[in-house]
Amino acid sequence: MTKDDCKKLVIEIISDIAPDEDLTNLKHDVRLRDQLQLDSMDFLDIVMELRKRHAIEVPESDYMQLASLDSSAEYLTPKFTAMGK
Amino acid sequence: MSLPRIVITGIGLTAPNGNSLSEFRANLLGGVAGVESIDVRYMGPLNAGVCHYDPLKHQKKKELRVGTRAGSISIYCAREALADAGLAAESIAKDRTGIYIGITEHGNVETENEIYSLSKFNYDTKFWSHYHNPRTVANNPAGETSLNLGITGPAYTIGAACAAGNMGLIHAAQMLRLGEVDLAICGGVSESIHTFGIFAAFKSQNALASHPDPKKASRPFDLARNGIVISEGGALYTLERLDDTLRRGAKIYGEIAGYHVNSDASDYVLPNPERQAECVATSIRRAGLQPRDIHIVNTHATATPLGDIQEADGLRTVFQNCPDTYINNTKSFIGHAMGAAGALELAGNLPSFDDLMVHPTINVDNLDPKCALPGLVLNAPVKAKRVDAILNNSFGMLGVNSTLIVKRYAA
């Protein structure tokens, strides 16, 4: 899996969590919370959906890694790759 | 001591046969039922009353994803009621507005959904949603409404089984009289059709209606009635003190004339006609009226074989020699909307103050002689000589009874 593939999966999750938001012009290097109306419960949703859809665990100590699309891809791509995806 | 007079100034509703008072009323007078067949989890197709309002009219998609059906129904009804009352949601005094919403139950839908979802993950609780608590707290429908409207006054629910719809209005009237708030958004809601548990429980109790034609399934007082049609819905009102209403020149649907709430203290599910009659008679006395002054009695009757007879017995003792009193039933059109029932059923009758028409109870092909009541309006509306007071019954499990009387406003 490439980092771009990983970002697509994250955006797919965000589109379900924040269905009113326009995600077409998301800046990859900017914190998601600075671009979208996401609260702490929404971030827990991202964590939950990664667990449900992709069997990926994100421990609480690593939540900050999901701050932006770039950091998410940096953090999650190796996890997907380790799972053979 | 003279208590402030409380009046109804706005109504917002969604029922299985209408998403506004005018639509609902037209269908009640036109004999149009709103029951359909739905697929209930684990149980298959069953008759139910489903609301078809547009949830996106007053909510964002995210609110719908995070919130509950009861919360959504409440928000729809609250905003429609405010608009109907001529009150701009943005300009009401948010800290002086109270939200009081009657519910039969809350949280079953969300808990069942969560357990069903968990079953797909081998019941590993790490897949349990972090939204479970805010979705299932008993105040959820009122809380979601306060969030949507930014109302900072008291907002909570009143759990009173199927007496709850009336209880929302009664409690609101009390809070207005106490001066706790200046505006109340009140009534009742239900999302019950989304939980299989309520269907299964009534089925186990042999109290779930079955009929090949969904629109004929809810048939209170008919000999062939065989139980309850479960429905969702909501009706919320704006209530205000009369003085405030007159100052702003608002329209008035009617005035809260009297009410009473009591308990059977006799059985978990079986009603008690003596206590019901006591509730009705006391509400009439507290309204300063006589039984003959009541021109419409909306019955609670749910179409259970025994319950309808019990209520008829209770009403017979109160309304003897009342030739101008008509008796009807709304559940025959929409099923039993549980926590919304009392509030919806009152709403459907309030236009009678203006048009003098009394909607019927439909689906009565063969009236059960034990349910025969003088003035029972069967299958077609009638025009009354006068409608000055409407009495609305709502009774619930564990023996909670509520009666609310609304009278025509007169200066």
Image: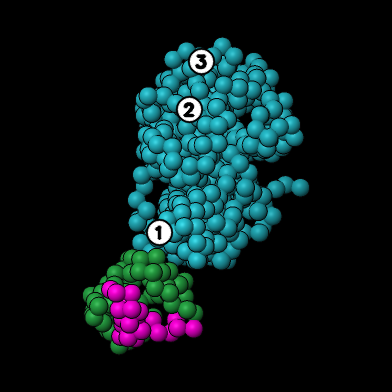
Residue marked by disc 2: B209
Chain that bears disc 3 = B
- In what element is the residue under mark 3? loop
Instruction: Write down which chain is painted cyan.
Output: B
Instruction: Write down which chain is painted green.
Output: A
Q: Amino acid at mark 1?
A: Leu
Q: In terms of depth relative to the viewer, which is nearer, A67 or B283? A: A67
Residue marked by disc 3: B223
Residue marked by disc 1: B64
What's the magenta bit mostly, secondary-structure-wise? helix
On the picture, is B81 further left or further right than A85?
right
Chain that bears disc 1 = B
Callout 1: few (<14), some (14-19), or many (20+) C-alpha neighbours within 10 Å? some
Q: Position of residue B402 (x, y in %)?
A: 64, 37
Q: Amino acid at mark 2?
A: Ala
- Nearer the N terminus, badge 2 or badge 1? 1
**Figure quadrant of residue B369:** top right
Q: Quick check: B240 above or below B285?
A: below
Chain that bears disc 2 = B
On the picture, is B299 further left or further right than B23?
right
Q: Amino acid at mark 3?
A: Leu
Q: In terms of depth relative to the viewer, which is nearer, A19 or B252? A: A19
Q: Quick check: A12 above or below B257?
A: below
**The residue stretch that appears in magenta:** A61-85
